[in-house]
Image: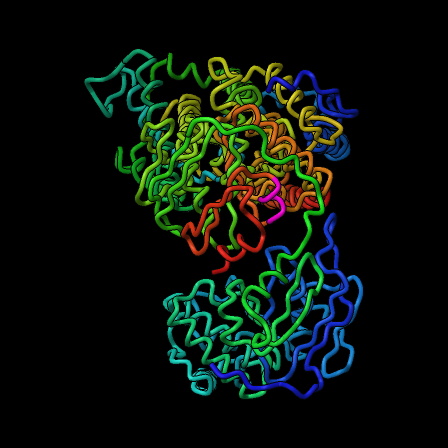
Amino acid sequence: MSQARTLETAPGAAGRRTRRWPPEAGILMVLVGLALAFEVLGWIFVRQSFLFNEQRLVVMILQVAVIGIIAVGVTQVIITGGIDLSSGSVVALTAMVAASLAQSSEAVRAVYPTLTDLPLIVPLATGLAVGALAGLVNGSLIAWTGIPPFIATLGVMVTARGIAKWYTHGEPVSLLTDAYAGIGSGAVPVAIFLATAALFHLALRYTRYGKFTYAIGANPQAARVSGINVGRHLIVVYTIAGTLSGLAGIVTSARAESGQSGMGMMYELDAIAAAVIGGASLSGGVGRITGTVIGTLILGVVTSGFTFLRIDAYYQEIVKGAIIVVAVVADQYRQRARRRGA
Amino acid sequence: MAVPAHDARQEWLLEARGVSKSFPGVVALDDVSLGVATGSVHALVGENGAGKSTLMKIIAGLCTPDSGELRLHGRAVQLDTPRRALQAGIAMIHQELNLMPSMTVAENIWIGREPVSRLGIVRHRELRHRTRTLLERLRIGVDPDTAVGELPIAARQLVEIAKALSHESRLIIMDEPTSALTERDAEQLFTVIGELRAAGRAVLYITHRLDEVFAIADQVSVLRDGRHVGSDRPANLSRDDLIRMMVGRELARIYPGAPGVPGAVVLAAHALTGARFRDVSFELRAGEILGLAGLMGAGRSELAAALFGLSPARTGHLSLDGVRVRIDSPRTALAHGIALLTEDRKESGCFLMLSILENLEIAALGREFVRAGVVRGRAVREACGAMSRQLRVKTPGLDECIGNLSGGNQQKVLLGRCLLLRPRILILDEPTRGVDVGAKSEIHELIARLAAQGTAVLMISSELPEILGMSHRIMVMHEGRVTGTLDRDQADPVQIMQLAAR
């Protein structure tokens, strides 16, 4: 528009940024509050500090790193207005497949006796490919058949678990190479978690991929009118989520130094919980990776804190459930407030 | 169909006195008074946006008037919920049917009022029997046990009517009931309406089809711009009288008018046929504003959706600059330089929870402002800021949520989204619907300026003054067909209405 430059600047028009509290401020306070509560309870009941114990914090973060990696993918799915129930099963499937290609020559009954001591890249690439394939199936089902994400990923969830069991007829795959086990040792899982979180945080904020992801979740019809190929984009998002579940499967099997078909049970729900606690809205269009990271840490603090106070694991699940419900109710209120503003 | 005489001034079944209602920025009804007699069919006509639906909603208890009152048999009543209206004997049959497709006809009719045994179990035999009696009384040949979803639209409409009558309603409001019906089904509906009248019920009948007014109505009332223009017996009126009453309005506002002389043909449609339009051919020139007039349901929006690739036409083809093209998705349309401003801002326009910036930039990101997948944030912000200033969007900043803007400003943002693409062909579907007067003339000026710069504009509008004031040529559609194309200097409201309402 040639006239754009000649028009006078309307008062109070665009250009300025309105500064507000970042949306993560609320849950960050919840995280800090929970940690402080455990600190106080710790001094009262077990005469120990909760926070000032490096080892405990490391264990805590290590425990949730796998959930965190999955949650980074699940957050993106939730932003499009979808859901992924298959993550936990995909963890098991990739753990089995990757581990079977990472066995050392010491393994007596290796899955592939001729394929032992392979270079690290083989189980890694295969594991990621298996995860990506599962995600591709999810995305294609949703984009092409139009069935709801809940159903599509529920089907893949059951199927993937089945394949994981069938793969070795339920036998665990053990005696893995040192290189492979290295992926799960020390702070490596945490580094992987933080790296994927950083990568996709940037992708969501600064790339076309991210803009399209939010747009589809906010209004798929308007996204289509804006020229976005909604189906193709959904396939990409689900494939990314599947790949990250595959990565989580590799990390899980590397940490355990074995692949088992029962791995990753209920991980999908923890990942969804982390995203929702972190502010992602199940109705789509809203969610940030930073929030999800904090949500993941909240899950970690609750688990670790209950263990620290020597409270039964049963209570842990009860409280975790309550936190998820509270997070979703809070989301409803936020949505309503936004609509009232409209 | 015979029209019984209603010469004696009888007591009104329902009377509206001085009813007014405004919505933000619009006066929908202005001091409307109207009476409906027992045992009569009262037709209500008017252009789109004349206030018919609002009046219906007030009578059916779906919204409350700002002032004025409703009287039932001479007594003032408060109808502030649909339930209250139903209890008072008023039932409304909506344009979109409100039936549950997976449930049977009987279950749908008596939902919430099923005959139950003392244990709370539904007595199905009784339910079926009641339904059969009701349907027989109305001579509706529908099996009470079929699922509503399996019935054709016409039969569903009759089920709705049966449901309304099962409430022993004295006044039945029908909002364009024949819009989805074939001629034969419409005949059956008219028979049922005739029987209702004979049974002493009253029918308030909204329609766009003037033929129906003359066929079934005892009385017709015309609304225009929220005012009651007049009521009379159809026998005392000619078709032209009715049309004149509907459109007889001065061009109150000044339109910038169609600028310049159009250039070469850029878009040509050849015999397009799709879901709601048939055999549509036209040419659109560079710098031309082609107005597309017609009543609601004439197939105009469907035609726009086809041109933009949202739901491509089944047969026929398009050519751009004389070259035949296939446009099967919005992406290909945008790649060819065709942009669309959709009719429904909330449904398919705005990303309500996202910011103004995100709403403006989204379409342009498909081909600009992106390097190796990464959005060039500053360049986009500058371009969007400039666009927002040019369109005078009133907002504290680009990061404001679009949901917090007024309708007019939202519309400007959506128009900005199109303009950032610098389209050669711009399709505007009701560009000023629900927009306040100030923003309206700004949008009109902008459209005129775009045309002056050579953009080809196809403008769908239900407002005759807008169509007449803005277009070089006016194409009129009626029930999916183009019924005429008029040059600006030979067009007048009556002529357009005649083509649109055949």
Specify whether residue A306 is in view: no
**Residue B184 or A318: which is nearer the viewer?**
B184
Image height of B217 relative to A208, above or below: below
Tell me which corner region of the image, top left, top right, bottom left or bottom right, holds residue A287.
top right
Tell me which corner region of the image, top left, top right, bottom left or bottom right, holds residue B85.
bottom right
Query: What kind of colouring is applied to the model shown?
Result: rainbow
Dominant secondary structure, magenta: helix
Residue drawn at point x = 29 percent, y = 16 percent: A104
**Residue B445 or B397: which is nearer the viewer?**
B445
Image height of B492 relative to B154, above or below: above
Residue A43, percent from left and from top: 76, 30
Residue B418 highlighted magenta (yes or no): no
**Residue B35 or A186: which is nearer the viewer?**
B35
**Left or right of A260 on screen, residue B130:** right
Residue A266, percent from left and from top: 47, 39
Specify whether residue B229 is in view: yes
Spot the residue most to the left.
Answer: A114
Image height of B256 relative to A244, above or below: below
Tell me which corner region of the image, top left, top right, bottom left or bottom right, holds residue A165.
top left
**Residue B279 or A98: which is nearer the viewer?**
B279
**Left or right of A196 on screen, residue A52:** right
Residue A81, percent from left and from top: 51, 39
Residue range corresponding to the magenta coloring: B463-469
Residue B466 highlighted magenta (yes or no): yes
Residue drawn at point x = 42 percent, y = 75 percent: B187
**Left or right of A107 on screen, residue A255:** right
Residue B336, percent from left and from top: 41, 26
Image height of B464 relative to A53, above or below: below
